[in-house]
Image (spheres, helix red, strand yellow):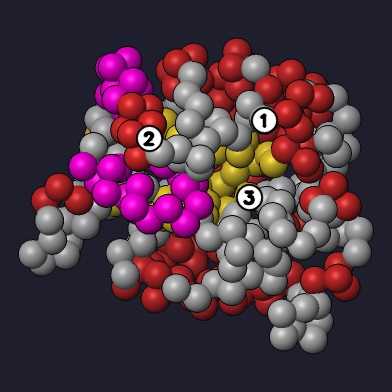
Amino acid sequence: MPQTSLSVQGEKFLINGRLTYAEIDGSNPNAHGLLMNARFIQGVFDDQADPARFARFDHAVWDADQHTADLIAALPEWYSYGLRGFTVGFQGGGPCFTVNNLTIDNNPFGEDGATLDTAYAQRMDRLIRAADELGMVVMVSYFYGDQARRLRDGRAVRNAVTTASRFLREGGYTNVIIEVANEYDIPPFQQHPLLYYPEGVAALSDLARQESGGLPVGCSGRGGAINREVAEASDVILIHGNGCTRQRLYNMIQEVRSWKLNRPIVCNEDSQAIGQMEVTFQTQTSWGYYNNMTKQEPPADWSV
């Protein structure tokens, strides 16, 4: 039986019918309804090409299941410091400094998109259920640029959205937000027009919502980029602050607000620019911490 039920009321998030953070005595009312989050994109990571190379950073062997278990073990401490959500990707993210992501095979989908690897599905299930027990929300990202090339064509992309969304529906999860793609408008997605152009992303967002049984859906663009068609197709408007000055981030948030969509705005990736959190808090926007050194280089150090 799920313990964490996420709902949206205008621009605010509620957990079990109560604004987030309102359960904390003496908390700042301006924080209520926000979803402070972190990017744990490698939470179900594995490499089917050469996994042994990830036996590093004082780890004698690479163990994908243990890697997920270590994240689960770290979640209570993150929760104690106020984290209420995190992003994890079915196709993970690219190690930024040590391994070329094009040499990694971190993809749970069959070439035609119609199947989901059982081991990936089990790791994702354990992670979502662990978050549910704590009162946390998981933003499940379906596609990552360098891995999306493993899908054969546009129909395979649609199939993969359906496959992942049905997995979430069948899991009965109530603490999930779907991110269709991580930065859909970057060059690696050009091979799949459905994932690269706003009208395709909007259509896939509708498909994800339908096949998941109505879970909230969003899709991020590259740092500093927003698109109204994608936002209008979203239940949660996902933005990235990478590479933005504080003024640019502020302007981007204000532009989204000018569209008067009355939906939550969530920055779910902003590198280590903690100073940006001041901008998002002042504009009633949820902010996402991203450490590309300790949290995106497998095996990740999941500690605070």
Q: Against 111, is 28 above or below?
A: below
Along the line of sight, the residue nearer the viewer: 77 or 102: 102
Q: Residue at label 3?
A: 89
Along the horizontal axis of the image, is 297 left or right of 148?
Answer: left
Do the numbered discs 2 and 3 sit on residues whose CB atoms are within 8 Å?
A: no
Residue 242 percent location from the top left of the image: 50, 42
Q: Residue placed at 49% from the left, 67% from the top? A: 130
C-alpha span from label 3 to label 1: 17 Å
262 drawn magenta: yes
Do the numbered discs 3 and 1 sit on residues whose CB atoms are within 8 Å?
A: no
Query: Badge 3: how crowded within 10 Å, few (<14), some, or many (20+)?
Result: many
Q: Residue at label 2?
A: 249
Q: Secondary structure at mark 2?
A: helix
Q: Tag 1: residue type?
A: Ile
Q: Residue furthest right?
A: 49
Q: Tag 3: residue type?
A: Gly
C-alpha span from label 1 to label 2: 19 Å
Along the line of sight, the residue nearer the viewer: 102 or 245: 245
Q: Nearer the viewer, mark 3 or mark 1?
A: 1
Q: Tag 2: residue type?
A: Leu
Res 126 visible: no
Q: Residue at label 1?
A: 186
Res 26 visible: yes
Q: Secondary structure at mark 3?
A: strand
Q: Nearer the viewer, mark 2 or mark 3?
A: 2
